[in-house]
Image (tube, helix red, strand yellow):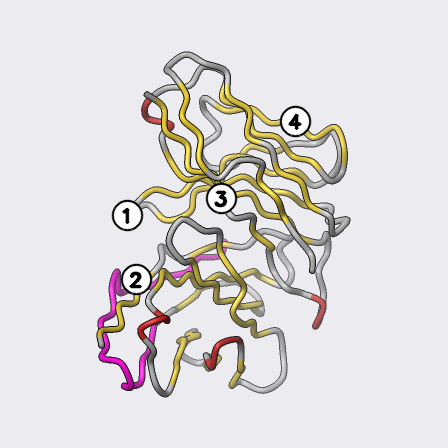
């Protein structure tokens, strides 16, 4: 079985400060990992993915995430937050050897204040 | 640009009505999914489909059915709408057997916010 945990329901950060949204996962094999963002009353948009290779993955809108196999984590980061980054963020995992289903975390609301 | 299109952004229906939520994708994806999203509950999978005329129950199929007569279209049906089905409904699609760097996970539609009164 595969699972994802996003331990924080909400993260608050001031504009211009660095942000981190946490994600830990559990799979029996090697993971594919994803981050999605959802703006109000919209669907989820793809931000970035880890498939293989470099542990630091860069994605859209200046976001990046670091794959840490020993800690089974895939935290989302941005060096300098913008008010427009305020949204709901979902981490997702798929076991490479276990079919096509993504398992999503419960989501973390990011609030960036001016 | 590839797209998943959900026919309605907002929908208001009466209790007991039969409701159809339509989803169309233009990416020739084999997999299609229906989720509902509620505050504090995250995304919950209702049904999914790996091929035409094929369907599998997700985590919360009760009160719903689906239809996939063509590869590009996956319909969610509320046989008799109830107020507890008021929610945001999200459709998604993906390639079968995604491997390597082509793997973009799921592509989502914009969602349908359904209110049952």
Q: Residue at left 29%, top 86%?
A: A16
- Whether callout 2 and callout 4 share a subunit is answered no
- Which tag, 4 or 3, sits closer to the chain's start? 4
Helix, strand or loop for disc 2: strand
Q: Give the residues drawn in magenta, as a range.
A: A1-21
Whether A9 is among the magenta residues is: yes
Question: Residue A10 location in percent, x, y?
Answer: 24, 64
* Mark pair 2, 4: CA separation: 33 Å
* Mark pair 1, 4: CA separation: 29 Å
Quick one: B80 or A14, which is closer to the camera?
Answer: A14
Q: Is residue B18 above or below residue A2?
A: above
Q: Is residue A64 visible?
A: no
Residue where numbered disc 1 is placed:
B40
Nearer to us: label 4 or label 3: 3
Q: Is residue B114 above or below residue B17?
A: below
Residue where numbered disc 2 is placed:
A109
* Mark pair 4, 3: CA separation: 18 Å
Label 3 marks a residue whose chain is B
Helix, strand or loop for disc 4: strand
- The crowding category of the residue bearing disc 2, from other C-alpha atoms within 10 Å (few below 14, some 14 to 19, many at least 20), is some
- Whether callout 1 and callout 2 share a subunit is answered no
Question: Residue B80 location in percent, x, y?
Answer: 45, 14
Side of A81 where B67 appears, left or right: right
Q: How many marks?
A: 4
* Mark pair 1, 2: CA separation: 11 Å
What is the number of the mark on residue A17? none
Residue where numbered disc 3 is placed:
B111
Quick one: B33 or B88, which is closer to the camera?
Answer: B88
Label 4 marks a residue whose chain is B
Residue where numbered disc 4 is placed:
B67
Nearer to us: label 1 or label 3: 3
């Amino acid at each position: 079985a595969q699972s994802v945990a996003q331990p924080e329901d909400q993260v608050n950060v001031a504009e211009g400060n660095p942000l981190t949204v946490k994600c830990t996962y559990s799979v029996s094999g090697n993971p594919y990992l994803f981050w999605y963002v959802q703006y109000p009353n919209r669907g989820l948009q793809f931000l970035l993915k880890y498939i293989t290779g470099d542990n630091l993955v860069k994605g859209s809108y200046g976001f990046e995430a670091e794959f840490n196999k020993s800690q089974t984590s895939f935290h989302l980061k941005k060096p300098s937050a913008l008010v427009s980054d305020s949204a709901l963020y979902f981490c997702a995992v798929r076991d490479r050897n276990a079919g096509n289903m993504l398992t999503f975390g419960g989501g973390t609301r990011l609030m960036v204040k001016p | 640009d590839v797209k998943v299109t959900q026919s309605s952004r907002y929908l208001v229906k009466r209790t007991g009505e039969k409701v159809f939520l339509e989803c169309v994708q233009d990416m020739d994806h084999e997999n299609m999914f229906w989720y509902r999203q509620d505050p504090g509950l995250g995304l919950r999978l209702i049904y999914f489909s790996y091929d035409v005329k094929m369907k599998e129950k997700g985590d919360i199929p009760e009160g719903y059915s689906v239809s996939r007569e063509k590869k590009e279209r996956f319909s969610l049906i509320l046989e008799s709408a109830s107020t507890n089905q008021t929610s945001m409904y999200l459709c998604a699609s993906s390639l079968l057997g995604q491997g390597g760097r082509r793997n973009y996970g799921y592509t989502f539609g914009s969602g349908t916010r359904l209110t049952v009164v």
